[in-house]
Image (cartoon, coloured by chain):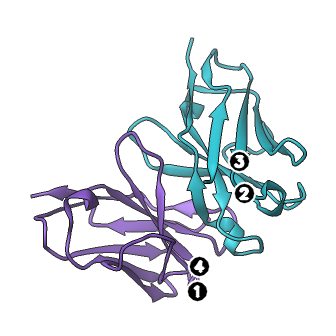
């Protein structure tokens, strides 16, 4: 059974930093691209970033480019999102999501999602 | 950035009725579209990929169609568990983008 478990969410002051992690199990992690998708309270879904199976092919949404850094450790079946310079507009539930397939474009739609980690940016 | 416009924002229907949800892209995305279902307190679930392919375990009452800029998700006969919010997502161009969602509510 595929499982994705996010951790590291919490309350942070504007301008602060936070690091999210996603622990994966139930599939061959090193074969799949992974993404972060967020959802602000009462709003729709917003794609944040993607990382390829070999840590290549990194892309970011314009709203987080230059502030967030995505990474992965295939030896530990984990993915991370380092979030710097956080603003109130970054308040959201952050989902870890597994690409549907092993090769593009199947990597860019999301077959499995975690339950999400809440990040609240507030003073 | 490709903008996806979903309509209507809310669809009020009764169980057993047919639901037709629309997703329009600001430019052609070929068939690079997926649909997701989201229920309160749950993570989104992939329903349809590549415009018309049902994901694993998705019932046959869900179908997708379209190409280019106009896409449709059809639920042939609504079951009680189908009342939820539905999002389309394009993966033709960067950045990946989602539509604003259509809420299917019980009439």
Secondary structure, mark 2, is: loop
Residue at left offset 82%, top offset 63%: A31
Placement of A94 over or under A29, stated as above or below: above
Residue at left offset 84%, top offset 44%: A71
Question: What tint does the image give chain A?
Answer: cyan
Q: Which chain carries label 4?
A: B
Placement of B18 over or under B43, stated as above or below: below
Q: Name the residue under label 2.
A: A27
Q: Name the residue under label 3.
A: A25
> Is the residue marked by circle 4 packed among few (<14), some (14-19), or many (20+) residues within 10 Å?
many
Question: What tint does the image give chain B?
Answer: purple
Q: Is residue A18 found left or right of B91 in the rendered image?
A: right
Kindly report the distance in space between the C-alpha atoms of the residues bearing marks 1 and 3: 33 Å
Residue B4: x and y, percent?
A: 47, 67
Callouts 3 and 4 on one subunit: no
Does the CB distance between marks 1 and 4 fall below 8 Å?
yes
Secondary structure, mark 4, is: loop
The nearer-to-camera label among 3 and 4 is 3
Residue at left offset 85%, top offset 61%: A57
Q: Mark 4 points at which residue?
A: B32
Kindly report the distance in space between the C-alpha atoms of the residues bearing marks 3 and 4: 27 Å
Q: Mark 3 lies on which chain?
A: A
Kindly report the distance in space between the C-alpha atoms of the residues bearing marks 2 and 4: 24 Å
Does the CB distance between marks 2 and 3 fall below 8 Å?
yes
Q: Name the residue under label 1.
A: B30
Callouts 2 and 4 on one subunit: no
Examine the rendering and report whether any part of residue A118 can be seen.
yes
Q: Nearer the viewer, residue B92 or A20?
A: A20
């Amino acid at each position: 059974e595929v499982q994705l478990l996010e951790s590291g969410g919490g309350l942070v002051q504007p301008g602060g930093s936070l690091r999210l992690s996603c622990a994966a199990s139930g599939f061959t992690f090193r074969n799949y691209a992974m993404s972060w998708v967020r959802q602000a309270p009462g709003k729709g879904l917003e794609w944040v970033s993607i990382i390829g199976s070999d840590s290549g092919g990194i892309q970011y949404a314009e709203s987080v480019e230059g502030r967030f850094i995505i990474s992965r450790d295939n030896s530990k079946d984990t993915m991370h999102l380092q979030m710097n310079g956080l603003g109130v507009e970054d308040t959201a539930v952050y989902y870890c999501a597994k690409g549907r397939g092993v090769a593009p474009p199947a990597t860019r739609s999301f077959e499995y999602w975690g339950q999400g980690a809440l990040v609240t940016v507030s003073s | 950035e490709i903008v996806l416009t979903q309509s209507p924002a809310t669809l009020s229907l009764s169980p057993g009725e047919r639901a037709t949800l629309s997703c329009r892209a600001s430019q052609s995305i070929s068939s690079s579209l997926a649909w997701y279902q989201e229920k309160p307190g749950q993570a989104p679930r992939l329903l349809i990929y590549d415009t018309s392919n049902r994901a694993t375990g998705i019932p046959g009452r869900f179908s997708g169609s379209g190409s280019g800029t106009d896409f449709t998700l059809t639920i042939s006969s609504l079951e009680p568990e189908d009342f939820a919010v539905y999002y389309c997502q394009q993966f033709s161009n960067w950045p990946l983008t989602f539509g604003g969602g259509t809420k299917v509510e019980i009439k």
